[in-house]
Image: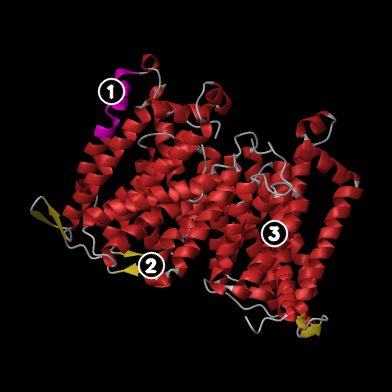
Amino acid sequence: MTETPQSIKQPAAATGSWYEFATRHRASIVAAVILVFPLVMPFTALAVNILIYGLYALGFNLVFGYLGLLSFGHAALFGTGAYLCGIAIVHFGWPWYAAIAAGVAGGLLMALLIGVLAIRTRGIYFAMVTMALSQCVYYLFYQAVDLTGGENGLRGINVRTIDLFGLRIDFINPMIRYYVIAAFVIAAFFVMSRILASPFGAVIEAVRENEMRARASGYDVTLTRLLTFVLSGGFCGLAGALQALHLSIVPIEILHYETSGLVVMIALLGGMGTFFGPMVGAAVFLVLENVVSVWTVHWQLIVGAIFIACVLFFPAGIWGTLIARGRR
Amino acid sequence: MAGLSFDLIALQLFAGLALGAIYVLFAIGLSLIFGMLTVVNFAHGAFYMVGAYVGLYLISIGGNFWICLVAVPIAIGLFGLAVERVLIRPLYGRGIDYPLLLTFGLSYVMVECVRIAFGKTGYPFDTPEVLQGAVDIGVGYFPLYRLFVIGATAVVLLALWLFLEKTSFGLIIRAGARDPQIVRVLGVDVSKMWLIVFGIGTAIAGFAGLLAAPLQGAIPEMGGTILAEAFVVTVVGGMGSIGGAVLAGLLVGVVVSMTSLFAPEMAKVSIFALMAIVLIVRPQGFFGRAGLMS
């Protein structure tokens, strides 16, 4: 993308002090919002979904918004995280924290495998190759019936209580479940903020803005892309693992290419290349889905139309547009 | 492997060519549009699917298959013209990802509209009576309809080749694919050309959908699967190259068909393995121009 909306890191001189403050403490602000969120949401289950998809979109946005590569294969990263977490619990009886670690590792590894192949291509090819490879992952998991349950999905991921330093926490209670998952999501937001603020984060954006110049400055563009994609896989793997714990089942549809498309929509709707955008996008998208599904089964028609309108008229997304307004 | 005779393998090879013919038709449309407009048409699968459904509808109101062969490409092509004119044209010059994203959204709308009109479940699509049965092709009996698919694809390819190579309009298209700016400077209305190319590409997609319908029936989701597989074809053949699309399409068809003979459970995965090999050995594909994507 050449005309991505302005990222958050801008020279502070041109903007108000509140803006600078918000940028500096962006992860803390997200944490505060996430902690208050379920108190204003009518359905806790929906709030949990928003958290998980927000995290998924956060990982995706690292590649799409900050690195400037459009991936249509992120379902493979999200799904692998979910499946590995689920398999660790169902087939190997691992405790919940080890299963989440397995999910993150799965996301990282799958991102490495897909990344090594897809990074060899450039530009628009990237979207096609990642989509094709994720379709391949779909078939592989579909056929490994013994491990994944195939078409029926992986069932029986029952985590009822969570042991934390001798403390037994009831994972069935929706409010507690929300805050357990929120702890991971908030931690992920802090890590993401740290990555983006690091020198490496600056290199990521340099590659997006001008590949040639980044290369001329001595940065390994290919390695940066691969590393960013793998990092993104870690975030998406975590999101997938949390999804598996939340749903107690991993449906095979999680690897379907519509799951890849979903995160593209969420990121674009929220505002690509913005820190808060993915969460805003996930919240608006899922609330809208909930509301529209009440009066029509043809939700996809509405989604498609909204998405077309977004691409045509609001390419900066909701949060991106707000930032642009606020900065003026 | 005792039962595997030469004849069986030869027959499977032909079946692969018939399957490959559908890939070829799908991928040349995709490639033609990309080569000219640098638009990756994510709705190409949806146009393909609508082609099958328009055929289904025409037959249900009393048309026959032969009428469909003419009417479906025209209808889908006209629809494609409208899509380019209204939705895609505003996005030129705004970055290569935007048309891709827009057509992705459009595919959702098209699939859901078909679900509303025809229902969520698929329909079988009868093979026209004249083309039922099998003929002896020397190595054994081969379904006549698949032979027809190969023949029809050859006719479309020949027509497209004649159009691109022998007409003055084709000359402009080829020049425009190489350097649209110079063509514009020479006084050619490039946007009109792009409109027509998009129409031709989608018309071929609709035609492919119609041809594929008797082989696999018509369901609203039929476009999604072939889209991913056609991306493999374009990556293997080289994006924007029509010759590459033809060769790679046939190759992918044969690979699928051969692996389903020897290792059926690997048939779907095999083509992605093929793509992985091509990406490692020759990232730009068979006939891809290096640097076109940068």
Image vertical order of residue A228 relative to residue B15, above or below:
above
Tag nearer the camera, 2 or 3: 2
The crowd level at tag 3 (other Cα within 10 Å; few <14, some 14-19, many 20+) is: many
Q: In this view, does B80 lie to the left or right of A232?
A: right
Q: Do labels 1 and 3 share a chain?
A: no
**Where in the figure is residue B285, as x and y percent of width and height?**
68, 48
Q: Looking at the image, which is closer to me, B177 or B67?
A: B177
- Please name the residue shown 19% across and 47% down the image: A39
The crowd level at tag 2 (other Cα within 10 Å; few <14, some 14-19, many 20+) is: many
| Colour scheme in use | secondary structure
Residue type at mark 1 is Phe
- On residue A246, the disc is none
Image vertical order of residue A133 relative to residue B269, above or below:
above
Q: Are marks 2 and 3 in contact (CB under 8 Å)?
A: no
Tell me which segment is drawn in magenta: A16-29
Q: To which residue does mark 3 refer? A: B26
Specify whether residue A27 is painted magenta.
Answer: yes
Badge 1 marks a residue whose secondary structure is helix
- Please name the residue shown 64% across and 44% down the image: B88
Q: To which residue does mark 2 refer? A: A148
The prevailing secondary structure element of the residues shown in magenta is: helix
Specify whether residue A58 is painted magenta.
Answer: no
Image vertical order of residue B166 relative to residue B257, above or below:
above
Q: To which residue does mark 1 refer? A: A21
User: Which chain hosts label 1?
Assistant: A
User: Which chain hosts label 3?
Assistant: B
Residue type at mark 3 is Phe
Real-space Cα separation, disc 1 to disc 3, in angstroms? 53 Å
Q: Do labels 2 and 3 share a chain?
A: no
Residue A290, quarter of the rendered image: bottom left
**Where in the figure is residue A188, as x and y percent of width and height?**
29, 41
- Please name the residue shown 46% across and 36% down the image: A65
